[in-house]
Image (cartoon, rainbow, N blue to C red):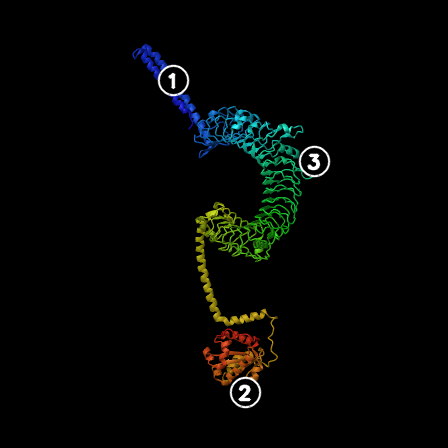
Amino acid sequence: MRLCTSDLYVQRTKETGNSARRVARSSARVGGAGSPRTLAPIMREVRVVEESRRNTVKIYIVLFLGSCLLGEKAALACRINERRAMCTWNSLKEVPVLPSDIILLDLSINNIGEVNEASFVGLEQLQILDLGSQRTEKLTIKEGTFRRLSNLTYLHLGDNHLLILEQDAFVGLSRLQNLVLLNNGLDRLILEEEYLKPLVSLETLDLSFNKIETIRPGLFFQNMTKLKVVRLKLNKVGSMCEQDLLGFQGKDFNFLEFSSLQLNDMEMHNFNWQKCGNPFRNISVRVLDLSGNGLYDDKARLFFKAIEGTNISHLILSSNTMGKGFGFSNLKDPTREIFSGLKNSSVKTLDLSRNYIFSLEFSVLSALQDAEEIILSDNKINQIQRNAFFGLVSLQKLSLSYNLIGEIYEYTFYNLPNLVELDLSYNHIGVVAYKSFSKMSKLRVLNIFGNSLKQLHTFETIPNLVLLNMSDNKLTSVYGLSVSSRNSSIIDLSHNRLSDLKCVYEILNKMPSVQILALSHNLLVQCIPEYSVPPQNSLIYLDLEHNALQTVWQKGICFDIFDNLSKLLYLFLSHNFLSSLPDGIFKGLTSLQVLDVSYNSLTYLPRNIFPESLEQLNLSHNFLSSPDPHNFQFIRVLDLGMNRFLCNCALKDFLLWMNQTNVIFFTPIDSLTCEYPKSLRGVQIKFYADLCEEEDERLISKLRLTLSIGCSILVMWFLICTITFAHFRGECFIFYKRTMKKVIEGHEKKPSLDTGCKYDAFLCFCSSDSKWVEMALLKRLDSQFSDKNLLRCCFEARDFIPGVDYISSISDAIWSSRKTICIVTEAFLKDGWCLETFRLAQSRMFDEVKDVLIAVVVGSIPHFRLMKHEAIRAFVKKKEYLRWPEDLQDLEWFYAKLTGKILEKKFKNKNATELQNIRTVVTN
């Protein structure tokens, strides 16, 4: 720590004690111990000394405490971190007490009005000091203030209202490299007098925004061999002549900032340029900034003539008044005579931005044969004359952005054989003539964004073009792009008017070298591809933001757009109105690392939708309520900010994963909150897991009880319904028939009787079963037995004519009836005539390919018994037959079924092949 008042107190206490001891010793020498006459005066003197000592102690204790309290308060006002003390904005009036190992001290924006040698006692290790922007009327730097700061390399004294320097203020700063004195109200004396003489290691001097009227550095500047940067921006300098800058001669500057000096005296007609000479004689400058000095055509011509031969690598002439501007004729545009004085200056870079050049005249810059970069941006250039760039054989970069160019002609860029980069951005270019770029065989970068181009087919081949930026134009098609940019690897077509997604297919098919493709801010709403994406493509970056892919995919088209992009690393799909992601849409992106689908309307993510290679995923600003954590198992960086989480137990799996995963959340977990239900809105989702566990237990208990009661009721209801139907199925069928009859009453069509048949049904049965057949069937079917019956039935006992051949009668009955009904009983199977009748009816069925045979099995005749009879076997294997019901409840259903079979017309395709056996219909 620095020397504190306590050290002085200890020293003064020791001196007081020594005085008292000297008085005692002298008294002993004078009179001895037993002489009362000499002892009294001595004792009085001792008491005076002791009282004085006590008063001194009190004074120094007060001083000590006050000094320490002030020092502690000042030190507390600073933020100290790793030998750096930040004391800014603390209203300090003096340099505070600080640790002695501080190397950086920021005292800016305080109320310090004066510093002297005592201000920095104990801070000898200081390397960086900032005393700028003091809120006092003036800042005085006393003589020898920095005498002990020999390690200081950076000193900021700028932006003080008034800086007062004593003659030897900078003594001791032998290692200072950077000195900032901007905006301090300093005049020319700061350069002429020897204030800066001690700074032998100075490299950068900033005197911008002062009141220096003449630049006349003292000859001591020649001793500053390391001085490379001088800033004198915004000083009111009238002129610069050779005699003024003698102190700078012999130096090799990296940067001289002489911008906004005005140089008004050099505009006068009586100004003697020959007497002024070359202000930069014997001075070489890598970057010379002369911007904002009002250099117009004549003034610039005379100035460049004066500095002829000066070595300048980079000349900045921006924000001057060169050119006549748009709509004016009182000034002239630059001609080649203006820059003729720079012919031997070896200018590599010329900055003429922010001037008023309207027309680039013939060979205007031909003097700059060594120029490699020319910046003409932000002028008023509307015309480029033929051979305007004549002589610029070394030019590699040309910027014409922010001008008024409307068209590019074939001759516009002649004489630029080595041009590598051309910037035509933000003009009004609407037309490009054919072969406009044909002479620039080495062109690799073409920036033509921010124009009004509508078509590309006029562009000819640019063989070495690598980057083509045509964003912010009015393109509606990419036709012709592959001709001009076949070998390009970077294509930017964003902010255009492309509407068909087929442009992606076309570019990748015809331009296999493309690695970066930007199509954002278009309106891709349809997709009619003429090509497929080839597997042999090089695309690694695809930007499709701010389009309408949802409109395309909801039509079920172009799902294969990403299938062959196996090298793609970056994909951006934000702002595409996506409400869902088609299954397998990313299956071909086997190398994808970064995916952005933010600012969409996604509510659900299909499982395994993302490729395993994905590392960074942006899903922010969607409507995901319960994300599936399985989709994030390979992700390293995830953004789920501003989604609308539904806080219910469906979110539990995601919450468990979130609390256990090592994934980096771009939006902090603390910012993820519930959106629904309304009662939990704003609650952090990480706190919902505990609530969910309690709710799970309650729901499980309720669910168990509900399932138990529900299952019991369902089983009981099923049993009741089954038993009821089993006992009352007949009544149920009758009720059904009556209901249907009432429903379709008035719309029911009477069954049409085939006029080609004499009978509706021929009943074949054994004579021993005649009474049963009459009671069971004929009284319910035959119209002669009851007027309610609709069918005309034929049977042997009534309708066969006696004396006629029996076989003929049977055959006539079969062919004269719509259907033949065989009542198969035990007696039927033993009666040969019955079996013969069955065979004849079956033969008619085969001949007419109609279902004209109905078999009704009566009694407990098993199926295998029927299969024993050859005449019946073929029928029962392929056709369904009826059984007489054993339960009387099924009689109505049986009659309805039998009547329906009699009246139905069923035709079969003769070419049809039977594929399966017909099941048996059992009516029991």
Kind of residue sitting beneath label 2 = Tyr
Q: Name the residue under label 3.
A: 330
Q: For marks 1 and 2, give the one nearer the viewer.
A: 1
For the residues labelled 2 and 3, the Cα–Cα distance comes to 134 Å
- Mark 2 or 3, nearer chain start: 3
Contact (CB < 8 A) between labels 1 and 2? no
Q: For the residue labelled by badge 3, is the local secondary structure a helix, a strand or a loop?
A: loop
- Mark 1 or 2, nearer chain start: 1
Name the image quarter holding the N terminus.
top left
Q: For the residue labelled by badge 2, is the local secondary structure a helix, a strand or a loop?
A: helix
Measured as percent of width and height from the top left, residue 600 is found at: 55, 50
Q: Residues within 10 Å of mark 3 (few under 14, many from 20)?
A: few
Task: Identify the residue at the far left of this view.
Answer: 34
Q: In this view, does 457 lie above or below 258?
A: below
- Mark 3 or 1, nearer chain start: 1
Q: Residues within 10 Å of mark 1 (few under 14, many from 20)?
A: few
Q: For marks 3 and 1, give the one nearer the viewer.
A: 3
Of residues 168 and 247, the one drawn nearer to the viewer in this rendering: 247
Contact (CB < 8 A) between labels 3 and 1? no
Say which residue appears at 49% left-offset and 71% top-offset.
728
Kind of residue sitting beneath label 1 = Glu
Q: Mark 1 points at which residue?
A: 51
Of residues 834 and 545, the one drawn nearer to the viewer in this rendering: 545
Residue 138 in view (yes/no): no
Of residues 667 and 538, the one drawn nearer to the viewer in this rendering: 538
Kind of residue sitting beneath label 3 = Asn
Task: Identify the residue at the far top of this view.
Answer: 37
